[in-house]
Image (cartoon, rainbow, N blue to C red):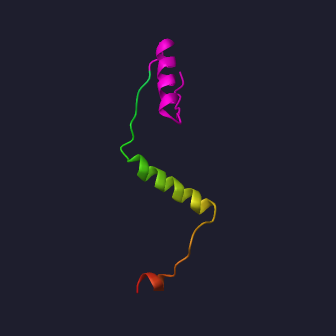
Amino acid sequence: METLIVHPQSKEMLTTLKAFLKALKISYEEYKSPYNEEFVAKIRQGDEDIKAGRTKKISLDKIWK
């Protein structure tokens, strides 16, 4: 059997998915991330900024002074 991991984009989607699975008698497990959602969003935004080239270079001389 396969395992599916879904990522609902809203609470409404999550509620609908749970109701759908329950109606079909499909078991599921809930996982809550130990990380703060705002923190994760900032990290993801940083990754997107890097990919888009929105970065600044700072020389080591400026950091150590």
- The C terminus appears in which quarter of the rendering? bottom left
Which residue is nearer to you in this view: 19 or 29? 19
Asked if the magenta segment contains residue 3, the reply would be yes
50 relative to 43 in the view: left or right: right
Q: Residue furthest left?
A: 34
Asked if the magenta segment contains residue 49, the reply would be no
37 relative to 55 in the view: left or right: left
Q: Which residues are magenta?
A: 1-27
Q: Residue furthest right?
A: 52
Above/below status of 48 relative to 15? below
Question: Residue 31: x and y, percent?
Answer: 40, 34
Which residue corresponds to the image point at 42% horizontal and 50% vertical from the top-left?
A: 38
Above/below status of 7 relative to 45? above
Which residue is nearer to you in this view: 50 or 12? 12
Q: Residue furthest front?
A: 12
Which residue corresponds to the image point at 52% horizontal and 33% vertical from the top-left?
A: 8
Question: Residue 33: x and y, percent?
Answer: 39, 41
Which residue corresponds to the image point at 51% horizontal and 53% vertical from the top-left?
A: 44
Which residue corresponds to the image point at 61% horizontal and 60% vertical from the top-left?
A: 51
Question: Residue 17: x and y, percent?
Answer: 51, 24
- How many numbered marks does the figure carry? 0
